[in-house]
Image (cartoon, rainbow, N blue to C red):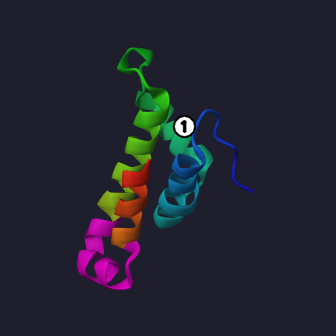
């Protein structure tokens, strides 16, 4: 079962859990640990930066096969969900 992400909206949590972690084939916990390894409190807005970090990694991964991912809709769905956050 995926971890509950404190302070995130349900849409932001959905983007990280259902879209990013699945596309990257990694756990949410691993994404959070990777993010927190480089996060500095002076950067501000933990939640927004976490979503940006996870989304950036997922988009980067999807771009390896952009034509195939656009054709099946996974790229556009991720981008749409990211815009909702």
- Going 52% across and 46% down the picture, which residue do you hit? 31
- Going 27% across and 70% down the picture, which residue do you hit? 64
Specify the segment rendered in magenta. 62-74
Check disc 1 and report the residue beneath it: 33
Local crowd size for mark 1, using a 10 Å CA cut-off: few (<14), some (14–19), many (≥20): few
| Residue in the foreground of this view, choosing between 32 and 17 | 17
Q: Is residue 36 above or below residue 24?
A: above
Q: Please tell me whether the stretch drawn in magenta is mainly helix, strand or loop.
A: helix
Answer left or right for 45 relative to 22: left
Percent across and percent down for residue 33 are 54, 37
Percent across and percent down for residue 3 are 70, 47
- Image quadrant assignment for residue 74: bottom left
- Going 65% across and 34% down the picture, which residue do you hit? 6
Answer left or right for 71 relative to 2: left
Q: Is residue 46 above or below residue 65?
A: above
Q: Is residue 7 above or below residue 65?
A: above
Percent across and percent down for residue 23 are 47, 66
Is residue 6 magenta-colored? no
In the image, farthest residue toward the front: 84
């Amino acid at each position: 079962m995926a971890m509950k992400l404190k302070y995130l909206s349900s849409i932001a949590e959905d983007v990280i859990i259902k879209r990013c972690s699945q596309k990257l084939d990694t756990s949410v916990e691993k994404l959070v640990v990777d993010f927190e390894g480089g996060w500095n409190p002076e950067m501000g807005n933990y939640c927004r930066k976490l979503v940006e970090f996870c989304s950036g990694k997922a988009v980067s991964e999807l771009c390896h096969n952009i034509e195939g991912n656009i054709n099946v809709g996974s790229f556009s769905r991720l981008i749409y969900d990211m815009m909702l956050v």
